[in-house]
């Protein structure tokens, strides 16, 4: 089928092409609700091993620094576990905030002796309380088995700063993509309607069928 014929088909059946897109657009506008805002907060911590006696030599300082990296790895695994979330939930309960451990999701990241914790939530007051509880538990309850139950020294490098996360690309393109798909469905329906329609509208169609045209009535 030539491009000109496609154009004639779509020009003749433009309503079929547009109906699915109009329906999708109308339903999308009626049922639209703005996405729930998501907020993020991140805090960095510097982790160090408690100083040992006679640790002023360069070699001892090197091993202390190297040990700090392993401690950060251990703290990262601890923060990811259910025990840490339970401790944070208990800390929040002491502040009359009932947040179950399953709702406390901390995303740790470690680089050498630095530990970065970030959290997402839909409420800024609750997020501020959660990151404060996380910081308290991390600093006060960090007795790792690798150190014989002794606490490590943790220094908070940042004050929590809450930022709103912009909507995802999927949320922004959801309705436009559905309209494009509806237009594609409309094009398919228009072509199907044209294929099933036995009406002959042009002399070229008769020629393709093998008929000889004896005359033609012009349009008024």
Image (cartoon, grey):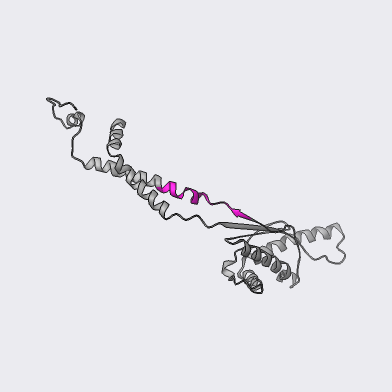
Which quadrant of the structure image shows residue 55?
bottom right
Q: Position of residue 32 (x, y in %)?
A: 44, 54
Image spot of residue 159 (x, y percent): 72, 58
Quarter of the figure that contains the C terminus: top left
Residue 81 coordinates in the image, percent (x, y): 62, 68
Residue 169 lies within the magenta run: yes
Q: Is residue 9 above or below residue 103?
A: above
Determine if residue 193 is in view. Answer: yes
Res. 105 image quadrant: bottom right
Q: Is residue 156 left or right of residue 51?
A: left
Task: Determine the residue positioned at 70% across, 65% down.
Answer: 135
Residue projecting furthest to the left:
214
Q: Residue at x 66, y 57 (%)?
A: 42
Main SS, magenta residues? helix
Magenta segment range? 163-178
Q: Nearer the viewer, residue 99 or 88?
A: 99
Residue 161 position in % (x across, y down) = 68, 56
- Whether residue 115 is visible, yes or no, is no
Image quadrant holding the N terminus, namely: top left
| Residue 185 sits above or below residue 47 on the image | above
In this rendering, the answer to whether 44 lies above or below 217 is: below
Quadrant of res 43 = bottom right
Q: Is residue 178 left or right of residue 120?
A: left
Q: Is residue 15 left or right of residue 45?
A: left
Is 140 within the magenta? no
Which residue is depicted at the point 57% across and 69% down?
A: 102
């Amino acid at each position: 089928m030539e491009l000109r014929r496609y154009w004639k088909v779509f020009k003749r059946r433009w309503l079929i092409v547009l109906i699915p897109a109009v329906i999708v657009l109308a339903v999308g506008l009626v049922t639209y609700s703005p996405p729930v805002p998501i907020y993020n907060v991140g805090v960095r911590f510097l982790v160090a091993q408690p100083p040992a006696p006679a640790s002023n030599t360069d070699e001892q300082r090197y091993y202390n620094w190297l040990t700090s990296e392993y401690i950060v790895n251990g703290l990262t695994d601890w923060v990811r576990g259910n025990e840490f979330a339970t401790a944070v939930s208990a800390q929040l309960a002491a502040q009359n905030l009932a947040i179950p451990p399953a709702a406390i999701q901390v995303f740790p990241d470690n680089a050498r002796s630095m530990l970065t914790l970030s959290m997402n939530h839909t409420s800024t007051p609750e997020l501020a309380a959660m990151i404060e509880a996380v910081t308290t538990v991390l600093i006060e309850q960090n007795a790792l088995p690798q150190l014989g139950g002794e606490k490590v020294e943790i220094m908070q490098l940042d004050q929590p700063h809450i930022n709103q996360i912009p909507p995802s690309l999927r949320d922004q393109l959801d309705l436009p993509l559905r309209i494009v798909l509806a237009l594609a469905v409309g094009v398919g329906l228009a072509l199907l309607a044209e294929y099933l329609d036995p009406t002959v509208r042009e002399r070229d169609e008769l020629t393709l069928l093998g008929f000889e045209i004896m005359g033609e009535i012009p349009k008024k």
